Image (cartoon, grey):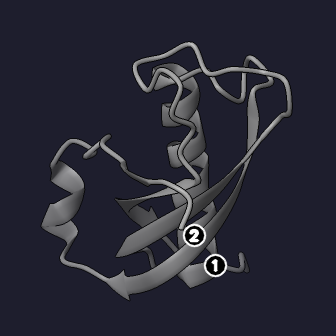
Amino acid sequence: MAVRHVTRMRCYYVLVRGDLDWVPGRSATDEFGAMKPAGFYCHRYVLAANEARAAKAAFERVRANLDRQMGWFRDGLATVALEAEEIATAPMHKLLKPDNRGHTFYGED
């Protein structure tokens, strides 16, 4: 008799905060010019088995998107610490929409 394992997947909304740490002596060569943001907020809708996996999936997508858009991490200009500020279940139809790839950046306090 075969054992069947069922994993129930849900849609999750994950609000991500990223804290940027800039490497001294390096400069950002993108549209921000001389401004080096201290961090950012963004959100992702992901399909996952639980909240921990939802956060992990959201972090991977945010990091990949920042590498494509900005190149800060790829070029060794900065590191980022990601944190899930909020995780909540969401309607499955949210997964049908393309990712909002925008970020809300903020400076030093």
Q: From where the camera sits, is residue 26 visible?
A: yes
Instruction: Tell me the tag on residue 67.
Output: none
Q: Is residue 19 above or below residue 109?
A: above
Q: Is residue 37 above or below residue 86?
A: above
Q: Quadrant of residue 47?
A: bottom left
Residue at image coords 74%, 36%: 78
Residue beneath label 1, please?
Answer: 52
Find numbered disc 2 in the image and state the secondary structure of the residue it sits on: helix
Mark 2 vs mark 1, CA separation in Å: 5 Å
Q: Mark 2: which amino acid? A: Ala
Q: Quadrant of residue 73?
A: top right
In front of the other: 47 or 75: 75
Badge 2 vs badge 1, beta-carbon distance below 8 Å: yes
Q: Quadrant of the N terminus?
A: bottom right
Q: From where the camera sits, is residue 6 visible?
A: no
Badge 1 crowding class, 10 Å Cα cut-off, few under 14, some 14 to 19, many 20 or more, is: few
Residue at image coords 84%, 24%: 25
**Residue at the right extreme, as displayed:** 24
Q: Is residue 48 left or right of residue 83?
A: left
Residue beneath label 2, please?
Answer: 55
Find numbered disc 1 in the image and state the secondary structure of the residue it sits on: helix
**Residue at the top extreme, as displayed:** 29
**Residue 90: x %, y % from top left:** 25, 79
Residue at image coords 61%, 21%: 28
In front of the other: 34 or 48: 34
**Residue 101: x %, y % from top left:** 32, 40
Q: Is residue 94 left or right of residue 84?
A: left
Q: Mark 1: which amino acid? A: Ala
